[in-house]
């Protein structure tokens, strides 16, 4: 009888396929038990932009209550968030750096509205949060705390008044730049203008401190990182970055900055973007860009020839895949250099076309945590990585704002063009 029951169980597991086999993995089961007590807080998810671009900006246009892995290109839905143990999610209200600042401001408010409509569409799952206490309360109630992060300081249109309105609308971090240098801060992926932050950029950071808004340094240059950490009285965050010493992309955090994190008190939330976590993928991307530029110079005015040439190049040079082991290497490096108190997770789901093998959707967090525990991470370590470090930073930012409650709002303005700063 025992043998019959055992064989029947095995047959059922095999018939159920990979999903049940993964659920039965003891490391992942252990990770899920940890996440029942400690909210996993992800620093960056672009689902609002994916809804805007592909689904008419309507949270009801796609059934997020079902697993969409096979039917859409979305990385996020409610079943996979639940399977991933996600307890707190910073929804990115991204708009492109190519927008003019006034248009970006409007689009950012629209993206904030999208997050609020997303939460309203699924009140049994999501609840808006603006504080660390909110996250823990919502997690205890079995819901996913939904927070708002602005990606790109150009959205404030050089106005501290707009900054305050974004805060009042629920935004709790701003990434100071995106892919382009702004009128007050240098980007990691554009020509520098200020050597870091301009004087007005320093005013922006100070006003964020006064409000209780986290300063996010993903996307900014190393000089901007150092300037912001010098000016800010509260810890900073990197909502979705990895380690430059492991993968030499300018978007990643150099060791010179990681070594300052214990003094700053902030957290680097490791992202899963393949070109940021795999040196092989980064090199392939660079080679592809170089080939596109070469073909463009050889075939001016003939885009078809460029397209044909790139298809041939890609066929001869298939894109490599990043893996979960690459992400583990970045997490481990940040821990080794900055310390266990200064590392977190910021997957960038629905903000990229491809993801590492093993991390293809938001259900993958227990798999990643299990891989770390297999490398010797303790449950206390996992709790810090998953959410405790972010909660600590949020409380420090909130305490800084509370200490400045009597201060008047800043009236600083960006100097007119041509005027000395």
Image: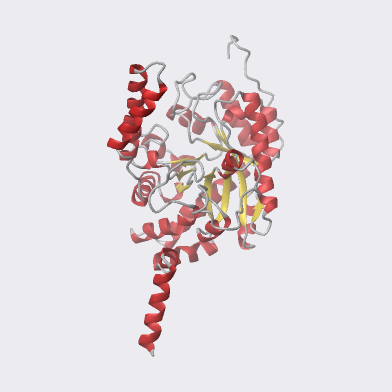
Question: In which quadrant of the rendered view does residue 379 lie?
Answer: bottom left
Front position in the image: 168 or 305: 305
* Percent position of residue 13, x then y: 41, 72
Question: In which quadrant of the rendered view does residue 380 lie?
Answer: bottom left
Q: How many marks?
A: 0
Q: Is residue 290 visible?
A: yes
Question: In which quadrant of the rendered view does residue 397 lie?
Answer: top right
Q: Quadrant of the C terminus?
A: top right
Q: Quadrant of the N terminus?
A: bottom left
Left or right relative to 253: residue 420: right
* Percent position of residue 190, x then y: 45, 24
Q: How was the colour assigned to the protein in this rendering? A: secondary structure
Left or right relative to 373: residue 100: right
Q: Is residue 39 visible?
A: no
Q: Residue furthest bottom?
A: 1
Front position in the image: 284 or 245: 284
Picture residue at 48% right of the left edge, 18% below the top: 193
Q: Is residue 65 above or below residue 414?
A: below
* Percent position of residue 88, x then y: 57, 53
Left or right relative to 323: residue 389: right
* Percent position of residue 385, x then y: 46, 53
Q: Residue furthest left?
A: 316
Q: Is residue 280 above or below residue 196?
A: below
């Amino acid at each position: 009888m025992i043998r019959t029951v055992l064989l029947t169980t095995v047959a059922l597991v095999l018939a159920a396929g990979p999903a049940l086999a993964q659920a039965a993995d003891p490391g992942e089961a252990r990770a899920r038990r940890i996440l029942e007590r400690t909210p996993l807080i992800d620093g960056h998810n672009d689902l609002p932009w994916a809804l805007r671009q592909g689904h008419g900006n309507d949270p009801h246009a796609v059934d997020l209550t079902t697993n969409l892995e096979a039917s859409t290109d979305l990385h996020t839905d409610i079943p996979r968030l639940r399977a991933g143990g996600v307890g707190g999610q910073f929804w990115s209200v991204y708009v492109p750096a190519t927008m003019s600042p006034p248009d970006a401001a409007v689009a950012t408010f629209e993206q904030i509205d999208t997050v609020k409509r997303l939460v309203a569409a699924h009140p049994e799952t999501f609840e808006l949060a603006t504080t660390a206490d909110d996250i823990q309360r919502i997690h205890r109630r079995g819901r996913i705390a939904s927070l708002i992060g602005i990606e790109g300081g150009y959205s404030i249109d050089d106005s501290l008044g707009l900054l305050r309105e974004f805060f009042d609308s629920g935004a709790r971090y701003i990434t100071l730049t995106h892919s382009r240098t702004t009128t007050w801060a240098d980007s990691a992926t554009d020509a520098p203008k200020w050597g870091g932050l301009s004087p007005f950029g320093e005013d922006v950071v100070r006003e964020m401190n006064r409000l209780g808004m986290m300063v996010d340094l993903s996307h900014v240059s190393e000089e901007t990182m150092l300037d912001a950490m010098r000016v800010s009285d509260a810890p900073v965050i990197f909502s979705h970055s990895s380690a430059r010493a492991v993968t030499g992309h300018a978007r990643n955090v150099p060791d010179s900055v990681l070594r300052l994190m214990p003094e700053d008190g902030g957290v680097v939330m490791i992202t899963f973007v393949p070109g940021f976590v795999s040196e092989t993928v980064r090199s392939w991307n660079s080679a592809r860009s170089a080939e596109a530029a070469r073909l463009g110079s050889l075939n001016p005015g003939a885009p078809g020839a460029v397209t044909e040439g790139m298809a041939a190049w890609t066929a001869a040079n298939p894109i490599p895949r990043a893996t979960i082991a690459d992400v583990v290497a970045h997490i481990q490096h940040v821990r080794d250099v900055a310390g266990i108190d200064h590392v977190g997770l910021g997957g960038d789901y629905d903000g990229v076309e491809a993801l590492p093998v093993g991390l293809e959707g938001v259900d993958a967090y227990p798999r990643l945590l299990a891989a770390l525990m297999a490398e010797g991470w303790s449950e206390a370590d996992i709790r810090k990585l998953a959410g405790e470090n972010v909660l600590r930073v949020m409380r420090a930012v909130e305490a800084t704002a509370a200490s400045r409650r009597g201060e008047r709002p800043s009236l600083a303005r960006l100097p007119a063009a041509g005027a000395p700063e």
